[in-house]
Structures are given as C-alpha cells and as structure tokens.
Amino acid sequence: MSSVYLDYNASTPLKPQAIEAAAQAMAMNANASSVHGPGRAARGLIERARASVADMVGAIPGQVIFTSGGTEANNLAITSAKAAGIGRLIVLSTEHESVAAAAEASGLDVLDWPVDGDGLADLAWLEAALRGGRAMVCLAMANSETGVIQPVDALAALTRAAGAWLHVDAVQTAGKLDIDFKALGADTLTLSAHKVGGPQGVGALVASANIDVVRVQHGGAHERGKRAGTENLSGIAGFGAAAKLADPAALAPQAAWRDAAARRLKAAGAMIMGEGAPRLSQTLSLVAPGFKSETQVMAMDLAGYAVSAGAACSSGKVTGSRVIKAMGHEDVACFALRVSGGWATTEEDWLGFAEAWLQAHARAAGRKVA
C-alpha cells in the first residue's frame, strides 16, 4: 500500500488540531439551535469557526454560509444566480465538474469559455462574451489538476465593468494562496474543509452583501435562513481549526521541490502541463505519451506513492482528463498524472516520487532499469 501521500488536491489529511476540535465538538452532544446552556455553547463553537473561516479568506463572518462541501456551495451559487434573473452562465472550460455539471443542469444558456495551451483563461474572449447581456462568470481561482492560477484581478475588473456576477471556486486555493474576498471583487466564493486539512463533508459559500442566496433546502432557519438543517457541529469545528492554521507561505518551498522533480521527468520525455503559467507551488501535472494514466497510478501505488490521474471527486473511474483536453492536448489526455503535496509533504517525498516514476516509466518503455 502507498506510504507517501501525494494526492492533497483530492483530499488533505486532517491536521491534528482539526481532529481534536472535531472530537471535542462530538462530545458536546447539543443542538446549536437550542437556547439552553449546552445549545448556546454549540452555537458559540459554530460562530467562532465561522469567524476563522471568514478570516482565512478576508471576509466577514456574516458572509459565510456553511454547506456540506464545495460541490453544494457551487450549486447553491448557480441556483441563486438563476433566481436573481441571470439567464447566461459563462463557464471556464477547465472548471471542476461540480460547476460544469451544475451549469448544464440549470437550464440556462451555458457558454464554454476557452483557455490557452497553458490553461489560462482567454480574457479577450470573455470581454466579448460579456457584451451579450448579464451573465454569471464561473472560474476556479486555481485548477485542481494543473494548479494553474487564473488572473482573477483582471477577470474581476471585466466582470464588474459589465455588471456580471463573478463566482470564484477557491476550493483548491484556500490555504495555498492569500485570499482577500473584499479586494477580489467576487460576488460568491466557495470553500471546502477537506482541502485545507479539515474534515470531509463540510464547506462554505461566501457571499457579498449585495447577493441574495436562495435556500434550496427547506425546513428551518439555519445558516441565517439560507440552508435548512441542523449544522454539522463537529465538521464545522474541524473546519474552523484547520482554517486558523492555513499558511500559504509554509507551502512555498514545495515549488522548488516540484520543479526539481519535473526536470528529471522532462528529461525522460514527460510533458509538464501549465508550465508556462503561474501555478500552485505544490501541484504538478504531467503527461507521458504512451504511459497510460491508470498504469502510472497503479505503478506509483505499488512503489508506495499515492498520486492521481486527475480530479478524484466522482466515481474513481479513470478517463482522459477533461482539463488537458480543454488545453488543446486531447491526443495525450489519457496519459496525464497529477502529483500534489501539502502540509506534511517533504522534499524527500518529491525526490522519491521522481525516482519511482522514472523506474516505472523505464519498465513500461521496455528499457533496462538502472
């Protein structure tokens, strides 16, 4: 079994402080909607966690709505845009499935927003598309597979000038880059606890004051009437603890470790996706023509390294990467591999992965392994 975990973009191992906070919340055994002492204590825990999550992204606590994760938050944002009378969705072609599928299911007109060969959004295309009437613009601040970081400041300026709704998926970015929700100019922004070292099954939608978030679940006035249902007390507590520990600077050294590994892989014939664009420091996307994604994943697993063929949020089935195809590399999309480090990753982990991959690649090519 894998002993070195390099799939942080799929899910980050829980930080010890998040485990402790979640366990303590489980022991409270009270409903945060109750007015007695234990209920008020639970409510206080939720509100402290809300403040920590808000602080992580430069928002105010009242802008944070807890959800079951980034997928629900993305769906809630799109549903709210439709309810506000927006008839068009402009969706970046490399978006996560939780945005792309929600857009398609919305019944609204969906425009496929192209990217260049490095995965960067086409600004000129967006500027022209925004002339066609009010729209919701959806983009991930950083791509989950390639780590490519979008020029959100420039994109936000275009959307503001056109009076459009800007929705930013920051699930992969929180804890890896500094985020200032107010300065960003987004109308809505999504987060997920398990990408920052918190528990799975909890996330948040951050909404600016001018946005009316519509309820999808009915049956209670929880989350300021925006999401009915008893809050996930332990999950929210763990999210808050992880948010307090978010430190993008701590991940910065991994860029050098990743690049050192990438140089060795390139020398063996691998292509590095998004190499010409700004990327998250701990994300590496590579393509090795002739070396199938699933074969790479299995070979690395046997060598003791847990990596991914791409986004790991659906059924686990490996298909050609939709992101790589959107970048114009459809002919090699089935040979893609994603490696992503995190808070517990070491330089030795990256070096060891590179060595293991080179050995596996040589065997697959029928060459003698040194």
Image (cartoon, rainbow, N blue to C red):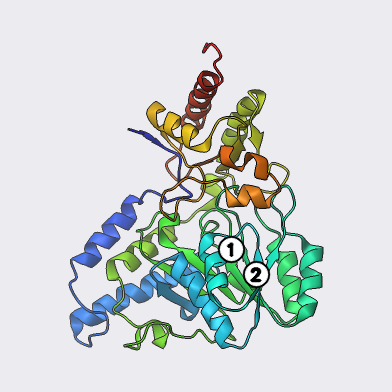
Location of the N terminus by quadrant is: top left
Nearer-the-camera pick, 302 or 46: 302
Q: Quadrant of residue 138?
A: bottom right
User: Mark 1 sits on what residue?
Assistant: 179
Residue 362: x and y in percent read 54, 19
Residue 192: x and y in percent read 45, 62
Category of crowding for the residue at label 1, using alpha-carbon neighbours closer than 10 angstroms: few (below 14), some (14–19), many (at least 20): some
Nearer-the-camera pick, 9 or 87: 87
Q: Tell me the amino acid under the disc marked 1.
A: Ile
Q: Is residue 141 visible?
A: yes
Q: Is residue 346 visible?
A: no
Number of marks in picture: 2
Q: Residue at x 47, y 37 (%)?
A: 294
Residue 190: x and y in percent read 51, 68
Q: Residue at x 60, y 56 (%)?
A: 142
Give the spatial CA distance, label 2 vs label 1: 8 Å
Nearer-the-camera pick, 157 or 74: 74
Q: Secondary structure at mark 1?
A: loop
Q: Secondary structure at mark 2?
A: helix
Q: Residue at x 46, y 66 (%)?
A: 71
User: Mark 2 sits on what residue?
Assistant: 184
Say which mark, if any, is on residue 64.
none
Q: Tell me the amino acid under the disc marked 2.
A: Leu
The reply to whether dot 2 and dot 1 touch (C-beta < 8 Å) is: yes
Q: Quadrant of residue 283?
A: top right
Q: Is residue 77 above or below residue 170?
A: below
Category of crowding for the residue at label 2, using alpha-carbon neighbours closer than 10 angstroms: few (below 14), some (14–19), many (at least 20): some
Closer to the N terminus: mark 2 or mark 1? 1
Q: Residue at x 55, y 87 (%)?
A: 83
